[in-house]
Amino acid sequence: MADKAGTIGIIAGGGQFPLLAAEAARKRGLIVTAVAFEGEADPAIGEMAHHTEWIGLGQLGRLIKAFKKRDVNKALMAGTISKGRMFSNIKPDLKGLAFISKFAIFHDDNILRALANELLNEGIEIVSSTIYLPELLAPELCFTKRKPSAEEERDIQIGWRIAKELGRFDIGQCVIIRNRTVLALEAIDGTKATILRGGKLAGEKAVVVKVSKPDQDLRFDVPSVGLETIESMVEVKASVLVIEAGKTLVFDREKMVDLADRNKISIISCKLQDE
Protein backbone atom coordinates (compact mmCIF):
# COMPACT_ATOMS: atom_id res chain seq x y z
CA MET A 1 0.00 0.00 0.00
CA ALA A 2 1.07 3.61 -0.50
CA ASP A 3 1.55 5.96 2.44
CA LYS A 4 -1.04 8.39 3.83
CA ALA A 5 0.07 11.11 1.43
CA GLY A 6 -0.81 8.82 -1.51
CA THR A 7 2.70 8.41 -2.93
CA ILE A 8 4.48 5.41 -4.40
CA GLY A 9 7.98 5.01 -5.76
CA ILE A 10 8.93 2.86 -8.75
CA ILE A 11 12.47 1.59 -9.28
CA ALA A 12 12.27 1.24 -13.05
CA GLY A 13 14.22 -1.13 -15.26
CA GLY A 14 13.57 -2.10 -18.86
CA GLY A 15 10.40 -3.29 -20.55
CA GLN A 16 6.77 -2.26 -20.21
CA PHE A 17 6.24 -3.35 -16.60
CA PRO A 18 7.32 -0.01 -15.03
CA LEU A 19 4.99 1.86 -17.40
CA LEU A 20 2.06 -0.41 -16.57
CA ALA A 21 2.78 -0.12 -12.85
CA ALA A 22 2.95 3.68 -13.04
CA GLU A 23 -0.30 3.81 -15.02
CA ALA A 24 -2.09 1.53 -12.55
CA ALA A 25 -0.87 3.55 -9.57
CA ARG A 26 -1.98 6.82 -11.17
CA LYS A 27 -5.45 5.38 -11.79
CA ARG A 28 -5.66 4.82 -8.05
CA GLY A 29 -4.92 8.49 -7.47
CA LEU A 30 -1.34 7.99 -6.28
CA ILE A 31 1.56 10.36 -6.89
CA VAL A 32 4.24 8.34 -8.69
CA THR A 33 7.96 9.01 -8.33
CA ALA A 34 10.12 6.89 -10.65
CA VAL A 35 13.82 6.32 -10.28
CA ALA A 36 14.81 4.98 -13.69
CA PHE A 37 18.03 3.30 -14.78
CA GLU A 38 19.78 4.97 -17.70
CA GLY A 39 20.08 2.71 -20.74
CA GLU A 40 17.44 0.32 -19.36
CA ALA A 41 14.14 2.07 -18.63
CA ASP A 42 11.82 3.24 -21.40
CA PRO A 43 11.99 7.05 -21.73
CA ALA A 44 8.17 6.99 -21.63
CA ILE A 45 8.40 6.51 -17.86
CA GLY A 46 9.06 10.25 -17.72
CA GLU A 47 5.54 10.81 -19.04
CA MET A 48 3.83 8.13 -16.96
CA ALA A 49 5.32 9.16 -13.59
CA HIS A 50 4.70 12.53 -11.91
CA HIS A 51 8.40 12.81 -11.06
CA THR A 52 11.33 10.95 -12.66
CA GLU A 53 15.00 10.76 -11.68
CA TRP A 54 17.46 9.06 -14.02
CA ILE A 55 20.40 7.26 -12.42
CA GLY A 56 23.18 4.88 -13.38
CA LEU A 57 23.44 1.30 -12.16
CA GLY A 58 24.86 1.22 -8.66
CA GLN A 59 23.91 4.78 -7.70
CA LEU A 60 22.16 3.84 -4.48
CA GLY A 61 22.73 7.17 -2.80
CA ARG A 62 20.98 9.05 -5.61
CA LEU A 63 18.09 6.56 -5.54
CA ILE A 64 17.51 7.12 -1.84
CA LYS A 65 17.87 10.89 -2.18
CA ALA A 66 15.29 10.99 -5.01
CA PHE A 67 12.69 9.14 -2.97
CA LYS A 68 13.29 11.11 0.20
CA LYS A 69 12.99 14.36 -1.75
CA ARG A 70 9.42 13.36 -2.70
CA ASP A 71 8.54 11.88 0.71
CA VAL A 72 8.27 8.36 -0.71
CA ASN A 73 8.22 5.69 1.98
CA LYS A 74 6.95 2.76 -0.12
CA ALA A 75 8.30 1.65 -3.50
CA LEU A 76 8.17 -1.26 -5.90
CA MET A 77 10.74 -2.72 -8.28
CA ALA A 78 9.59 -3.23 -11.86
CA GLY A 79 11.36 -4.04 -15.09
CA THR A 80 14.50 -5.80 -16.20
CA ILE A 81 18.21 -5.07 -16.00
CA SER A 82 20.44 -6.42 -18.77
CA LYS A 83 22.83 -8.45 -16.69
CA GLY A 84 25.58 -8.26 -19.29
CA ARG A 85 25.70 -4.48 -18.82
CA MET A 86 26.58 -4.94 -15.16
CA PHE A 87 30.17 -5.68 -16.19
CA SER A 88 30.67 -2.55 -18.27
CA ASN A 89 28.06 0.08 -17.37
CA ILE A 90 27.85 0.05 -13.59
CA LYS A 91 28.53 3.50 -12.12
CA PRO A 92 28.33 3.23 -8.33
CA ASP A 93 28.27 6.30 -6.12
CA LEU A 94 29.84 6.11 -2.65
CA LYS A 95 26.81 4.49 -1.02
CA GLY A 96 26.45 2.08 -3.92
CA LEU A 97 30.12 1.15 -3.75
CA ALA A 98 29.85 0.44 -0.03
CA PHE A 99 26.77 -1.71 -0.70
CA ILE A 100 28.39 -3.69 -3.54
CA SER A 101 31.55 -4.36 -1.54
CA LYS A 102 29.54 -6.50 0.92
CA PHE A 103 29.00 -9.29 -1.61
CA ALA A 104 31.42 -12.11 -2.33
CA ILE A 105 29.09 -13.58 -4.99
CA PHE A 106 26.58 -11.59 -7.04
CA HIS A 107 23.35 -13.60 -6.84
CA ASP A 108 20.12 -11.81 -7.74
CA ASP A 109 18.16 -12.76 -4.65
CA ASN A 110 20.95 -11.90 -2.25
CA ILE A 111 21.46 -8.48 -3.82
CA LEU A 112 17.76 -7.62 -4.09
CA ARG A 113 16.88 -8.71 -0.56
CA ALA A 114 19.88 -6.80 0.78
CA LEU A 115 18.82 -3.76 -1.25
CA ALA A 116 15.30 -4.00 0.17
CA ASN A 117 16.76 -4.11 3.69
CA GLU A 118 19.05 -1.18 2.94
CA LEU A 119 16.12 0.89 1.73
CA LEU A 120 14.01 -0.12 4.72
CA ASN A 121 16.78 1.20 6.98
CA GLU A 122 16.33 4.50 5.14
CA GLY A 123 12.57 4.45 5.77
CA ILE A 124 11.58 3.12 2.31
CA GLU A 125 9.68 -0.17 2.25
CA ILE A 126 9.79 -2.34 -0.90
CA VAL A 127 6.34 -3.77 -1.64
CA SER A 128 5.21 -6.48 -4.08
CA SER A 129 5.87 -5.57 -7.70
CA THR A 130 2.38 -6.82 -8.60
CA ILE A 131 0.52 -4.85 -5.92
CA TYR A 132 -1.39 -2.78 -8.50
CA LEU A 133 -1.42 -5.35 -11.32
CA PRO A 134 -2.40 -8.74 -9.89
CA GLU A 135 -4.16 -9.53 -13.16
CA LEU A 136 -0.76 -9.90 -14.86
CA LEU A 137 -0.02 -13.04 -12.84
CA ALA A 138 -0.73 -16.18 -14.86
CA PRO A 139 -3.80 -18.22 -13.85
CA GLU A 140 -3.65 -22.01 -13.91
CA LEU A 141 -4.78 -23.04 -17.41
CA CYS A 142 -3.83 -23.89 -20.97
CA PHE A 143 -3.79 -20.59 -22.87
CA THR A 144 -3.74 -22.12 -26.32
CA LYS A 145 -5.79 -24.38 -28.54
CA ARG A 146 -3.11 -27.05 -28.63
CA LYS A 147 -2.21 -29.02 -25.50
CA PRO A 148 1.10 -30.82 -24.96
CA SER A 149 1.52 -34.38 -26.22
CA ALA A 150 2.31 -37.28 -23.88
CA GLU A 151 6.02 -37.01 -24.76
CA GLU A 152 5.99 -33.28 -24.14
CA GLU A 153 4.28 -33.87 -20.79
CA ARG A 154 7.20 -36.09 -19.76
CA ASP A 155 9.63 -33.35 -20.78
CA ILE A 156 7.61 -30.81 -18.77
CA GLN A 157 7.92 -32.93 -15.63
CA ILE A 158 11.69 -33.30 -16.03
CA GLY A 159 12.25 -29.71 -17.07
CA TRP A 160 10.22 -28.41 -14.12
CA ARG A 161 12.38 -30.25 -11.57
CA ILE A 162 15.59 -29.10 -13.21
CA ALA A 163 14.40 -25.50 -13.51
CA LYS A 164 13.54 -25.47 -9.80
CA GLU A 165 17.02 -26.71 -8.94
CA LEU A 166 18.52 -24.04 -11.19
CA GLY A 167 16.48 -21.44 -9.34
CA ARG A 168 17.50 -22.90 -5.99
CA PHE A 169 21.09 -21.91 -6.82
CA ASP A 170 19.86 -18.48 -8.01
CA ILE A 171 21.40 -18.94 -11.46
CA GLY A 172 18.41 -18.76 -13.80
CA GLN A 173 14.76 -19.74 -14.21
CA CYS A 174 14.50 -21.30 -17.66
CA VAL A 175 15.31 -24.76 -19.05
CA ILE A 176 15.08 -26.02 -22.65
CA ILE A 177 14.46 -29.75 -23.06
CA ARG A 178 13.50 -32.27 -25.74
CA ASN A 179 13.10 -36.04 -25.55
CA ARG A 180 14.15 -35.99 -21.87
CA THR A 181 17.45 -34.32 -22.80
CA VAL A 182 18.36 -30.95 -21.34
CA LEU A 183 19.62 -28.68 -24.12
CA ALA A 184 20.10 -25.30 -22.41
CA LEU A 185 20.02 -23.73 -18.96
CA GLU A 186 19.48 -20.02 -18.40
CA ALA A 187 22.38 -18.06 -16.97
CA ILE A 188 23.38 -14.41 -17.34
CA ASP A 189 22.34 -14.32 -21.03
CA GLY A 190 18.61 -14.38 -20.21
CA THR A 191 15.56 -16.27 -21.43
CA LYS A 192 15.59 -15.26 -25.09
CA ALA A 193 19.19 -16.35 -25.62
CA THR A 194 18.49 -19.58 -23.73
CA ILE A 195 15.54 -20.39 -25.99
CA LEU A 196 17.58 -19.71 -29.11
CA ARG A 197 20.55 -21.78 -27.88
CA GLY A 198 18.45 -24.75 -26.81
CA GLY A 199 16.02 -24.50 -29.67
CA LYS A 200 18.76 -24.63 -32.30
CA LEU A 201 20.17 -27.76 -30.67
CA ALA A 202 16.72 -29.36 -30.62
CA GLY A 203 16.11 -28.58 -34.29
CA GLU A 204 12.39 -28.37 -33.56
CA LYS A 205 9.78 -29.21 -30.89
CA ALA A 206 11.80 -27.96 -27.92
CA VAL A 207 9.95 -27.58 -24.62
CA VAL A 208 10.61 -24.31 -22.77
CA VAL A 209 10.09 -24.42 -19.00
CA LYS A 210 10.23 -21.17 -17.03
CA VAL A 211 9.42 -21.23 -13.33
CA SER A 212 9.81 -19.10 -10.22
CA LYS A 213 12.63 -19.73 -7.81
CA PRO A 214 11.79 -21.77 -4.71
CA ASP A 215 10.30 -19.38 -2.14
CA GLN A 216 9.99 -16.69 -4.83
CA ASP A 217 9.79 -13.19 -3.35
CA LEU A 218 7.07 -11.37 -5.29
CA ARG A 219 8.62 -8.04 -4.40
CA PHE A 220 11.20 -8.50 -7.14
CA ASP A 221 12.62 -10.69 -9.91
CA VAL A 222 9.26 -12.28 -10.77
CA PRO A 223 9.68 -14.36 -13.96
CA SER A 224 7.85 -13.00 -16.98
CA VAL A 225 6.90 -14.01 -20.51
CA GLY A 226 5.37 -12.15 -23.40
CA LEU A 227 5.23 -11.74 -27.15
CA GLU A 228 9.03 -11.74 -27.47
CA THR A 229 9.14 -15.15 -25.74
CA ILE A 230 6.87 -16.69 -28.37
CA GLU A 231 8.70 -14.92 -31.20
CA SER A 232 11.93 -16.57 -30.04
CA MET A 233 10.18 -19.94 -29.90
CA VAL A 234 8.79 -19.49 -33.40
CA GLU A 235 12.30 -18.75 -34.66
CA VAL A 236 13.57 -22.16 -33.48
CA LYS A 237 10.29 -24.06 -34.02
CA ALA A 238 9.85 -24.80 -30.31
CA SER A 239 6.54 -26.42 -29.41
CA VAL A 240 5.66 -25.85 -25.72
CA LEU A 241 6.03 -23.06 -23.17
CA VAL A 242 5.43 -23.94 -19.53
CA ILE A 243 5.15 -21.29 -16.83
CA GLU A 244 4.27 -21.33 -13.14
CA ALA A 245 0.73 -20.27 -12.27
CA GLY A 246 0.42 -17.43 -9.79
CA LYS A 247 4.14 -16.64 -9.93
CA THR A 248 4.74 -15.55 -13.53
CA LEU A 249 3.93 -12.24 -15.19
CA VAL A 250 2.30 -12.46 -18.62
CA PHE A 251 2.56 -9.42 -20.90
CA ASP A 252 0.68 -8.83 -24.17
CA ARG A 253 -1.40 -11.92 -23.45
CA GLU A 254 -3.75 -11.74 -26.45
CA LYS A 255 -0.95 -11.14 -28.97
CA MET A 256 1.19 -13.84 -27.37
CA VAL A 257 -1.55 -16.46 -27.48
CA ASP A 258 -2.56 -15.52 -31.02
CA LEU A 259 1.00 -15.96 -32.29
CA ALA A 260 1.30 -19.25 -30.42
CA ASP A 261 -1.95 -20.59 -31.89
CA ARG A 262 -0.89 -19.62 -35.40
CA ASN A 263 2.34 -21.60 -34.94
CA LYS A 264 0.80 -24.56 -33.08
CA ILE A 265 2.68 -23.74 -29.88
CA SER A 266 1.17 -24.84 -26.59
CA ILE A 267 1.31 -22.46 -23.59
CA ILE A 268 0.63 -24.07 -20.22
CA SER A 269 0.43 -22.32 -16.85
CA CYS A 270 0.44 -24.85 -14.03
CA LYS A 271 1.57 -25.81 -10.55
CA LEU A 272 3.68 -28.94 -10.23
CA GLN A 273 5.46 -30.51 -7.30
CA ASP A 274 9.01 -29.18 -6.95
CA GLU A 275 10.36 -32.54 -5.84
Image (tube, helix red, strand yellow):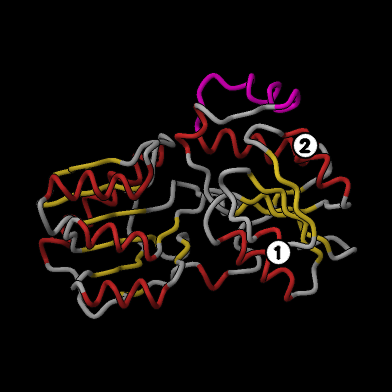
Q: Is residue 69 left or right of residue 135?
A: right
Report the residue that reaches farthest toward the bottom: 145
Q: Is residue 84 left or right of residue 40?
A: left
Q: Residue at x 30, y 68 (%)?
A: 268
Judge whether residue 103 is colored magenta: yes
Which element type, helix, strand or loop, lies under badge 1?
Answer: helix
Q: Position of residue 131 (x, y in %)?
A: 65, 64
Q: Residue at x 45, y 66 (%)?
A: 250
Q: Are marks 2 and 1 in contact (CB under 8 Å)?
A: no
Q: Position of residue 109 (x, y in %)?
A: 54, 38
Location of residue 109 with respect to 97 vertically, above or below: below
Read off the residue under disc 2: 62
Instruction: Say which of marks 2 and 1 sits in front.
Output: 1
In space, the residues marked 2 and 1 are separated at their CA atoms by: 21 Å
Q: Nearer the viewer, residue 30 or 255?
A: 255
Q: Residue at x 40, y 78 (%)?
A: 254
Instruction: Please tell me the numbered disc located at residue 219.
Output: none
Query: What kind of residue is marked 2?
Result: Arg
- Name the quadrant of the N terminus: bottom right
Read off the residue under disc 1: 47
Q: Residues within 10 Å of mark 1 (few under 14, many from 20)?
A: few
